[in-house]
Each structure stands twice: as structure tokens, then as C-alpha cells.
Image (cartoon, rainbow, N blue to C red):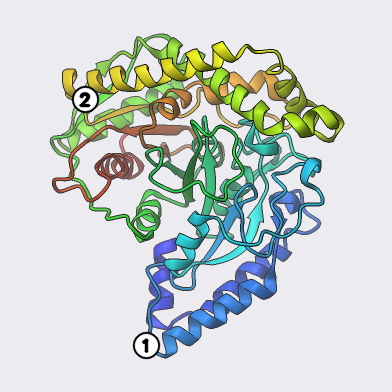
Amino acid sequence: MTLRDTTAALAKGELTATGHVRQVLADLDALDGTPWSNLVAARNDAAALESAARADAELAAGNWIGPLHGVAVAVKDNIDVAGMPTRCGSNVLADAPPAARDARIVERLREAGAVVVAKTHLHEFAYGPSGLVNASGPARHPHDPTRITGGSSSGSAALVAKGIVPLALGTDTGCSVRTPAALCGVVGLKPTRGALPVDGVFPLSTTFDHVGLLARDVLDAGLAWGALPGIAHLRTPVSGLRVGRLRGGLWDVPDAAFESALDDACRTLAHLGAEVRDVTLPETDDLLAVYPVVTGSEAYETHQRWFENDPDLYQPATAALLAAQRDRPATDYVRAVRTAARLRRDVLRRLRRDDGLDALITVTTPLRSAALDSDPAALRGPLLQMCIPFSVLGVPAVSVPAPGGGDFPIGVQVIGLTTGTGGHGSHPAESTALALAMAVEGSALS
């Protein structure tokens, strides 16, 4: 069921939280012995069933915990969940003890009534976009085990795509919610940087790390976003929004199917009353250039002691990335951080004030799911390049499957720019991005 079907059934008493969670746990059990068994990194069934029973008891007493009352959710294994270890897909943390407390975002989920049922596979330490690199082996595409999920929130995207959980948490530093969402055919929301707390999340880059949501469709993503404490989400009318379609350089994808998907999306938005026009992002190369310097430097600082003591505990692809950061001068890092801050200020001012835009639209990646035997290093650039600019800018972005994509869909990325709270809720740029993404998702135009 979708998230909204699940919440409705729970609210009406047509489904108990215990029955729902037991079914999800049984579906997770059914992954054993299949190519998808490693999508689950950790479980604590007793704790999940205890939370579900508590949700049922509260409802029987007339107490509604929140909009996600009794809903089973999965959490990426770089986010702390009390009672389960956080191993980040790495042998480095093979002996990690159970977390003593929940990450703040998990606390917020529980405040909304959710029940955590599992922790999920990720590209080791979230340092890669393919989902191929993990101590347990690669994550496999939910519809074809010979292909990749994308990453780094690989298991979260795949479990949602397989219909096992209606909602999952991921993290997104450069593309890690949006890329697996695009490749697996689900919706990934990366909110504005700082909108969701990262306390209790194992860091990749403290400058660019975001927490994000993965759901079956845009309506579910919006429901989950609005369910979190402190978020007031209001549906924004598409009519009158000003949308820039990115053109030039890497934004012009040579694959005709991707251009056609964008054509359809833009035609739909125009039909609904949005003003859509072509725009350029001349700062693209600069945005792409600062990202690996900042992320690599911060990642190496986090891992330096472990990496220098025992580099063989890391998967080879991760070790190669960390080794490449070892001799970078501190001045390069400082310069990149300052450049990123300047770009955020100047680019957003131009897009919002000078160009008068409420949103941007492009594809999420320039390719569909690749073969499982692909080289992670070769995939790194293509899977990151369309997403990195909006991580550096810190603006919200939603990846939504283009209609008619089938098992290997094309992701369309909508980036919110709206400011001011008038009629948009507490986070206007997210409301704009979700409204436009919902219109794209619902399009039947060809």
C-alpha cells in the first residue's frame, strides 16, 4: 500500500499497527536467500513490535500520536537508531555497538508516530553514488538483480520500490537520495540544507550533508514531509510559477529519451499555467569543482585515524577516494568553502531576484540503471553531476520518475527556489518543488 493508504487504514481501524509491522517484517524475511537479502543492514524485530503494540494501545485509548501513527519505516544505516548498530556498510564499523539513542531525525519520525523496522544498505560511508560498494556486496536493482540501485541510499530506495515499506530515510550529500530514487523509480526529496537535523547521522561532509525522504510517489513524499514536527506543508498552485529549464553544457543530455521526458514535463507544467523558459547556469563548472574538495577534505578528516591505522578495512573504491585526499593543502579546502559560500549567495540571488524564478527543472541523472559489474569510478561522475550543484546551493530538490519509464525509469529533478512564506507553508521552496513534481508525475502527455 501507499503511505496514504496505510495511514488511512490505520486511522480507520481497518489495519492495526501490529498487523502492519508483522507483515513488513515477514516481507523482509522473504528477502532471505534472494539477490536482495543485503538490502537490510540490521533489524530489531522485538523493538519494532513493541512500538507497534504501543501505537495500537494508544489508539485504543483514543490517543493519536501523529500523522505517521503505526507506520513502518526503514532508516539508512548511517543514521543512529537506538538498539541497532550503525555500521555504514563498512568493515571499519563491523564491531560497532548498538546506538545508545536515536538520531534527531529518527526521534522526529517517532514523534509523528512511525515505527522503525530496519536499517538499510548504503554505499560505504555514503561516499559514492552507485550502491556498488559495501562490505556485504552491492545493492541490486529492485526490478532486475543484474543492475544497480544507485546510491548512496541504495537499500532505502530499493525497499520502497519493492513495496516493502511505504517510507524510508536516506541522506543526500551530493545525490544520494535523488539518484537511487531516479534509478529505482521512486520519489526522493532532498530538503533545504538544515531543514532536517543531522544530529546522530554519521558525517560524510558536514558542509553538504542533508537528510532526505524516499517514498512511492510525490503525494506520499509530501505527506511524510508535512508529517514531521515543525514542518507546515501547504500545496502550492502550479499556475503562475516561473520555472527555468536548464540548458547548455552538461544540462543538454544527448539521449533523446531524456530530452523527451523533459519536453513532456515542461509541456505539462505550461499546460497547467506555469511559465517555463530556458535558462543557463554558467556557474555549473564552479559548483562541480568545489564539491569534491570540500567533501573529500571533510571525509578524510573524519576517517584519518581509522584509514591510516588500517586502510584494508575499507572497500578498495572507498580507500582510493580517501587516499586521494591525504595530501590536499588546507588552503585548498578553505578556498573551496569560501567559494561555495559565494556561489550560494550570488547564484541564488540571480536566479531568484534577477531571473525571477520559483524553480528549476532538469533530469536527475543522464543515464538509467547500469549493469552490476560496472566500474564504480566510471559511474561516479554521471550519477553525481546533475545533482551536485543543488547540494552546494543547499536548495531543495525532488527526483520524480518521468511517466512511462517502466522498470528502468528516467528521473526528472525539480529544484525549489521560492522564498517567503505567503501561502506556501513553513518551507516554501519545498512546497513549490513538490507541487511541480506532482504535476510531472501525473502527466500523461507524450
Asked if disc 1 and disc 2 are in contact, CB closer than 8 Å, the reply is: no
**Separation (CA) of disc 1 from disc 2:** 46 Å
Q: Residue furthest bottom?
A: 61
- In the drawing, does residue 421 fall left or right of residue 89? left
Dot 2: what SS? helix
- In the drawing, does residue 86 fall left or right of residue 290? right
Dot 1: what SS? loop
- Placement of the C terminus among the 4 image quadrants: top left
- In the drawing, does residue 192 fall left or right of residue 422? right
Mark 1 surroundings within 10 Å by alpha-carbon count, few (fewer than 14), some (14 through 19), many (20 or more): few
Looking at the rendered structure, the kind of residue marked 2 is: Arg
Looking at the rendered structure, the kind of residue marked 1 is: Gly
In the rendered image of this protein, does residue 417 appear above or below residue 112?
above
Residue 62 disc label: 1
- In the drawing, does residue 218 fall left or right of residue 276? right
Residue 295 disc label: none
Mark 2, residue position: 352
The foreground one among 112 and 263 is 112
Locate residue 339, reporting x and y percent: 42, 15
In the rendered image of this protein, does residue 332 appear above or below residue 112?
above
Locate residue 93, reporting x and y percent: 77, 46
In the rendered image of this protein, does residue 74 appear above or below residue 301?
below
Q: Which is nearer the N-term, disc 1 or disc 2?
A: 1
Locate residue 421, reporting x and y percent: 18, 45
Locate residue 417, reporting x and y percent: 27, 32
Residue 252 visible in the displayed image: no
Q: Quadrant of residue 251?
A: top left
Q: Quadrant of residue 25?
A: bottom right
The foreground one among 403 and 197 is 197
Residue positioned 49% across, 62% down in the render: 107
